[in-house]
Amino acid sequence: MIRLFVAIDLPEDLREHLAVMQAGLPGAHWVDPDNFHVTLRFIGEVPDNRLEDIDELLAGITARPFDLSLAGVGSFARGREPTSLWIGLDRSEPLMALQSRIHKALTRAGFPSDEKRYLPHVTLARLHRAPAPDLATFIAAHNLFRAEPFRVDQFTLFSSQLTSAGSIYSAEAEYPLD
Ligand code: 3AM
């Protein structure tokens, strides 16, 4: 089995910019900057022999390149327990359209996902018992964060290996937009 997800990679200068923010929050397990991405669609565990079908399906998705801007900071929680800290993105119609096309194609091909609303983000940290006041202070301190727009001219199929030292992501294939 192979664990897969589809995502947009970030340029190196933006990774470095985000990495500077990774400090000063107790309970934060900071994501390795090499692993920063904007998830488009989580696929999950599939038999290795489905990789070719998924590759073909993604290769058939067409879209024009577009610009994206990272802006703002927020957190996700399970119940009252915060689980992740993320950087947000300015609203982008081309991003939502690309996500929707990928999501529908995978669902139609028999790769279901949870039906949660898509909220584009870049995960900065996983949180384990981060004290609420510290989290609120971190979010307030970084809430005005805004980066220069970057060009999205491809998306990537990643595999994810879960290890005791964290997830190892590998690019399996890249799909140019043009
Ligand atoms: O880094 P982010 O949060 O964008 O949260 C996981 C990560 O996204 C997400 O897939 C990305 C690569 O692991 N993910 C993991 N399990 C998931 C699931 N069951 C999931 N997304 C939806 N459903």
Image: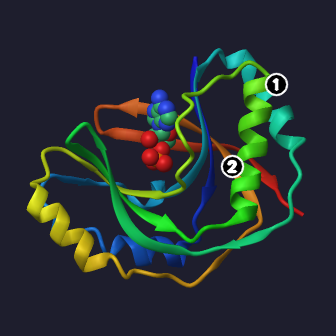
Quadrant holding the C terminus: bottom right
Label annotation for residue 53: 1
| Left or right of residue 45: residue 53 | right
Amino acid at circle 2? Thr
Q: Residue at 72%, 63% (x, y): give it.
A: 93
How packed mark 1 is, by other alpha carbons closer than 10 Å (few <14, some 14-19, many 20 or more), is few
Residue 20 lies, in percent from the top left, at: 32, 76
Q: Identify the disc placed on residue 156.
A: 2
Residue sitting at 67 percent across and 66 percent down? 92
The answer to which of 96 and 164 lies nearer the viewer is 96
The N terminus lies in quadrant = top right
Q: Nearer the viewer, residue 176 or 78?
A: 78
| For residue 29, above or below residue 1 | below
Q: Gap in Å between the C-alphas at discs 2 and 1?
A: 15 Å
Amino acid type for the residue under numbered disc 1: Asp
Mark 2 neighbour density, 10 Å: few (under 14) some (14–19) many (20 or more):
many
Question: Which residue corresponds to the image point at 57% horizontal and 46% vertical from the top-left?
Answer: 118
Q: Is residue 173 left or right of residue 76?
A: right
Q: Nearer the viewer, residue 117 or 32?
A: 117
> In the picture shown, does residue 111 fall above or below 91?
above
Can residue 23 be spotted in the picture? Answer: no
